[in-house]
Image: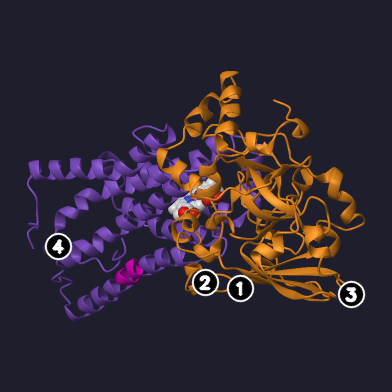
Chain colours: A orange, B purple
Amino acid sequence: MIIKRPSDIRPSEITDEAIYLDRRRFLQAAGFAALGAAAAVSPPARAASEASQPKIQGLVQSTLSIDEDPNSWEDITTYNNFYEFGTDKSDPHRKARDFQPRPWEVSVSGECDRPGTLSYADFVAPHTPEERIYRLRCVEAWSMVIPWVGIPMGDALKRFEPNSRAKYVTFKTLLDPKQMPGQRWPVLDWPYVEGLRIDEAMHPLAIFGIGVYGRELPNQNGAPLRIVVPWKYGFKSIKSIVSIEFTEKQPLSSWEKAAPSEYGFYANVNPEVDHPRWSQASERLIGKGIFAPRRPTEMFNGYADQVAQLYQGMDLTRNY
Amino acid sequence: MAFPRSLSQPQLRVAKTALFALCALPFLVMVLGAFGLAGVSLGANPVEELMDRNGQWGLRFLLITLAVTPLRRITGWHWLVRLRRMLGLFAFFYVLMHFVTYALIDHRLDLGIIVEDIIERPFITLGITALVLLIPLAATSTNAMMRRLGKRWQTLHRLIYPIAILGVWHFWWQVKQDLREPLIYALILAVLLGYRMWWQRRQAARSADHDDGLTGDPDGGGKPARPSMPLAQ
Ligand code: HEM
């Protein structure tokens, strides 16, 4: 693998997907994934949609990125779970085309000293966008590597000065069945609600996601503002956020409400605690082709060193 | 209708060939997609896509097979029954490919994982039960076997009902939250099985009326109705 030293590579040099794909081709030339070759060849239609996403200025690299090849723009933007646009993986990119991520407002409320409603621009402006390459592990036992652009969640939340009663942060997605056709059917109790314990939200790995591949988030990936919590299953990383509330009580998240025996509040990636209907011991790798072996799932999605202490003394079998 | 009640041998051969091509088409598309040929793609998660498509086609063909008898009775196209074996075998084929994708491509024949899944995950237990029950039906689908088994053949092939129910139930338990799709399959299955129950009742009532035991069964070709076997087809 090529070791990237973030300090000596300028962001403008590495955020383009073309460069990632060059790296990928290099690896393939080295005899890596022969069968993955087909997957790396990009259909022409895709370039346009990537090019049409505005670039994010002033991006810096993060040392918290993992050193793995990201999935293609195509994989990341056409294979999505975003039930607000439909339950099929291909629904979001087809049905979110006309979604309007601007103007966008985020209300911050609850147990904090400086609540308020901010425009998207005001919400993110004080922070330097960072590229964070994280593995995304879906609860459905597949994973991707995604070059997110984000701002540290803790830094952003601290601006609102949460008080001592702020034990949890609750996030809500936009409720707008006109724009989000999936919300016209009660698959979940809309709007989507997710939450984190405050110490989880303040963890350096947690970010507000605002882009992928150096460009603004495509609608199907949760434009304009989502969270990314890489040690938890993907469904915790709520998209298209309009409300952030600091609460004293643990919120009831949407999936927990829908199927409490299958989805818990914590939803930490854990190969030892199976979903009742499938094993979580391994995962299918998106973009590696049909004959690639499954990969063993890692505790906390590989972030155990950084986050395990958050859960010390907790029974993770019960707090799944 | 333009279709005759019966087909000549050459006509039947054409019908069978055309049907075979049609039934094999989804599999052909999957093979092209699996190898990225002819611009066909299976998307970002091809293993899941193969599993889902084969499972869906398996279930569809089970239901199509079950639709033959009602359709034949309603339309009077008796030749439809001559196509039923092929439809049933395609159902078996797609379910088998569904299992092959699961066991070979996804889990690389790791028996530990497969056995654990079968024992611990009820939706897989249902699926494997359906597949195992399909095996004797496929194995006895030849003319020779039909002749050899005689009346028992029909009794055996009534397994198609529990198999279809298990298939829909398996799908139902597999989905994460959105039950609309399995619900559609369940409704179709309910109509197909409901039709048979209705037919059975009607036949029973008729044979009670006609004490000679003969009825105007439109598909029986004047043969005596067999109220004891109304579900057989
Ligand atoms: C008559 C037998 C069977 C039928 C009709 C059937 C049908 C289906 C259908 C329709 C689906 C849903 C596909 C979708 O989500 O679009 C499915 C999913 C699934 N089936 Fe089956 N199946 C059968 C047997 C089996 C067997 C024997 C196994 C394995 C031992 C199996 C394993 C699975 C798995 C793992 C999934 C989930 C795939 C995923 O992750 O999306 N099935 N099946």
Q: Chain of mark 2?
A: A
Q: Nearer the viewer, residue A2 or A262?
A: A2
Looking at the rendering, in which quadrant would you find the N terminus of chain A? top right
Disc 4 or disc 2, which is closer to the eye?
Answer: 2
Measure how far apart labels 1 and 2 are at the Cα level.
8 Å
Q: Which numbered disc, 3 or 1, marks the residue that appears first in the sequence? A: 3
Q: Residues within 10 Å of mark 4 (few under 14, many from 20)?
A: few
CB of mark 4 within 8 Å of CB of mark 3? no
Q: Nearer the viewer, residue B138 or A94?
A: A94
**Disc number for residue A183:** 2
Q: Are marks 4 and 1 on the same chain?
A: no
- Which region shows up in magenta? B191-196
Residue at the disc numbered 3: A165
How many numbered badges does the structure rendering display?
A: 4
Amino acid type, mark 4:
Lys
Q: Is mark 1 within 8 Å of ligand 1?
A: no
Vertical arrangement, residue B217 with respect to residue B123, above or below: below
CB of mark 1 within 8 Å of CB of mark 2? yes
Amino acid type, mark 2:
Gln
> Measuring 28% from the left and 60% from the top, which residue is drawn there?
B67
